[in-house]
């Protein structure tokens, strides 16, 4: 047994236990050889059914890189360019002013930089499946759903986005803000350009050539439906948060390109080989080396450590070489893929409960592989001085139409951020940039100012939140 494994597994077991995760599957390969494979817990806790490298989990937003692979294939075929204006393919999109709208390109959609603010329409696309889910009954999500229309088709999504009355965050290419709606519309572009439904295109041109036989959009399409996880979620019952089985899969037929594939550790390791071997995998050329390099680009600053490529986070300054990664989260799903292509190393972590700090687990895994303590910080946090007077500029409540919010307050000369009813001290690290520590994770926050110098927005959870009001000081 490798020396790093016992310490990592102790770290992983504690994290999973604290999260009350019913089950997890982890696999790592390097240069075609298994480095590590391990399952924790069960795919069905009640029946004590085991997990495997072939157990089907949801992967949520890990789907986004598949969507970008499809776009790159269509570019290679000469059917589009990532620099084409989106309105060429989606003329019904009439959001915002025409001059602004016409600047949005496919590249901007792929990099979450179209300038759109966070929008609420993914839940509208999931509304029918969510309403049918007993786990939603009696929750805040049930109330929020009532405010949204049913968005069952690309045309309905386009109409909803076009009728949005909020202001853009900025010109296309200027502002990064994670946008599921833009990715949903990439599915519409793929469908219109290829002449195939998005799901069929991905199946025919990515999944089948790679031999990913247990990767599907609908588990009913699996030949063998036995080794499929049950989904679990946290729900407050009589005021107490409990992990419950919630087996109904949420779905969004008009936004599947944003995050609705299901897959396995083994299949995803095969997929990641595309990025570790310049497009060659299982005897099939899925992407040219040039397209692979484009997907690894650092096009948009995510935070002080990471940039966004095409459907992938990219960290050029990661201690062990360039790191590519992406996570995913939906009900019953916490997923993460990663690759260190220069080392031929790739890995997958899949968990059947939402809300698990899966990236913290991945960082612990990467630390352990590099002979660092699992909980070691990847990057040093060096505080910079900030006067109490300067702190006041950031104080306020920040919100988005995606129902994400945060409050910045000042207590005894220190700034704090309150999210999900928990308060954390903020550490200033750069001008208008802070971090806070949540568990073993270091979370980066940026603030953005108007031309007159007033703080107007902040980034949190990859989204841009608008400053709505100031917090009254005692």
Image (tube, rainbow, N blue to C red):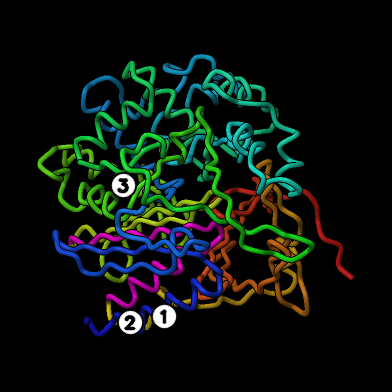
Magenta-tinted stretch? 344-369
Residue visible at 74% across and 66% down?
240
- Residue 30 pos. (x, y %): 18, 63
The residue to which callout 3 is attached is 297
Label 3 vs label 1: CA separation?
Answer: 27 Å
- Secondary structure at badge 1 equals loop
Q: Establish if 237 lies above or below 439.
A: above
From the viewer's perspective, is 458 left or right of 191?
right
Residues at marks 1 and 2 touching, judged by CB atoms closer than 8 Å: yes
Q: Magenta stretch: residue 210 in it?
A: no
Residue at point 26%, 41% (across, down) = 213
**Which residue is the extreme one toward the front?**
47
Residue 351 located within the stretch drawn in magenta: yes
Q: Nearer the viewer, residue 258 or 97?
A: 258
Q: Quadrant of residue 397?
A: bottom right
Which image quarter: residue 7? bottom left
Q: Nearer the viewer, residue 3 or 427?
A: 3
Q: Mark 1 and mark 2: span between their CA atoms?
A: 7 Å
Tell me the crowding category of disc 2: few under 14, some 14 to 19, or many 20 or more residues within 10 angstroms, Cα based. Answer: some
Position of residue 275 measured from the top left corner of the image (x, y, whole percent): 22, 49
Q: Residues within 10 Å of mark 1 (few under 14, many from 20)?
A: some
Q: Find numbered disc 3 in the image and state the secondary structure of the residue it sits on.
A: loop
The secondary structure type at the circle numbered 2 is loop
Foreground tag (2 vs 3)? 2
Left or right position of 13 against 266: right
Dividing the picture into quarters, in which one does residue 437 lie? Answer: bottom right
Q: Residue furthest left?
A: 283
Mark number for residue 372? Answer: 2
Q: CA distance from mark 2 to mark 3?
A: 28 Å
Q: Quadrant of the N terminus?
A: bottom left
Q: Which mark is residue 376?
A: 1
């Amino acid at each position: 047994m490798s020396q790093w494994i016992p310490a990592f597994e102790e770290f992983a077991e504690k994290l999973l236990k604290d999260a009350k995760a019913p089950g997890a599957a982890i696999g790592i390969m390097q240069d075609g050889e298994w480095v590590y494979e391990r399952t924790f817990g069960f795919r069905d806790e009640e029946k004590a059914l085991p997990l495997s490298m072939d157990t089907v989990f949801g992967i949520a937003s890990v789907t986004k890189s598949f969507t970008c692979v499809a776009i790159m294939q269509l570019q290679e075929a000469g059917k589009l360019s990532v620099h084409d204006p989106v309105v060429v393919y989606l003329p019904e999109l009439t959001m915002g002013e025409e001059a602004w709208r016409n600047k949005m390109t496919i590249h901007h959609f792929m990099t979450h930089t179209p300038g759109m603010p966070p929008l609420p329409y993914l839940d509208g696309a999931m509304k029918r499946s969510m309403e049918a889910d007993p786990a939603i009954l009696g929750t805040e999500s049930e109330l929020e759903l009532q405010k949204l229309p049913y968005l069952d088709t690309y045309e309905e999504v386009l109409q909803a986005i076009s009728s949005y009355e909020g202001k853009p965050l900025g010109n296309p290419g200027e502002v990064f803000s994670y946008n599921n709606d833009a990715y949903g519309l990439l599915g519409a572009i793929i469908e219109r350009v290829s002449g195939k439904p998005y799901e069929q295109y991905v199946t025919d041109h990515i999944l089948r050539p790679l031999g990913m036989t247990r990767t599907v959009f609908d588990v009913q399409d699996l030949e063998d439906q036995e080794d499929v996880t049950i989904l679990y979620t946290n729900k407050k019952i009589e005021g107490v948060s409990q992990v419950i089985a919630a087996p109904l899969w949420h779905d969004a037929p008009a936004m599947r390109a944003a995050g609705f594939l299901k897959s396995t550790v083994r299949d995803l390791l095969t997929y990641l080989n595309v990025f570790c071997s310049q497009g060659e995998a299982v005897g099939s050329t899925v992407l040219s080396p040039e397209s692979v390099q484009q997907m690894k680009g650092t096009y948009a600053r995510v935070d002080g450590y990471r940039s966004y490529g095409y459907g992938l986070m990219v960290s050029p300054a990661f201690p062990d070489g360039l790191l590519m990664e992406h996570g995913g989260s939906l009900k019953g799903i916490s997923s993460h893929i990663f690759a260190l292509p220069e080392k031929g190393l790739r890995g997958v972590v899949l968990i059947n409960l939402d809300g698990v700090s899966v990236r913290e687990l991945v960082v612990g895994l990467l630390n352990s592989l590099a002979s660092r303590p699992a909980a070691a910080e990847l990057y040093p946090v060096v505080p910079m001085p900030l006067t109490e007077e300067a702190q006041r500029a950031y104080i306020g409540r920040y919100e988005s139409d995606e129902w994400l919010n945060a409050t910045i307050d000042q207590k005894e000369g220190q700034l704090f951020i309150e999210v999900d009813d928990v308060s954390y001290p903020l550490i200033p690290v750069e001008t208008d940039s802070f971090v806070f520590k949540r568990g073993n994770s270091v979370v980066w926050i940026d603030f953005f100012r108007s031309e007159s110098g007033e703080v107007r927005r902040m980034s949190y959870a990859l989204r841009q939140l608008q400053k709505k009001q100031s917090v009254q000081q005692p």
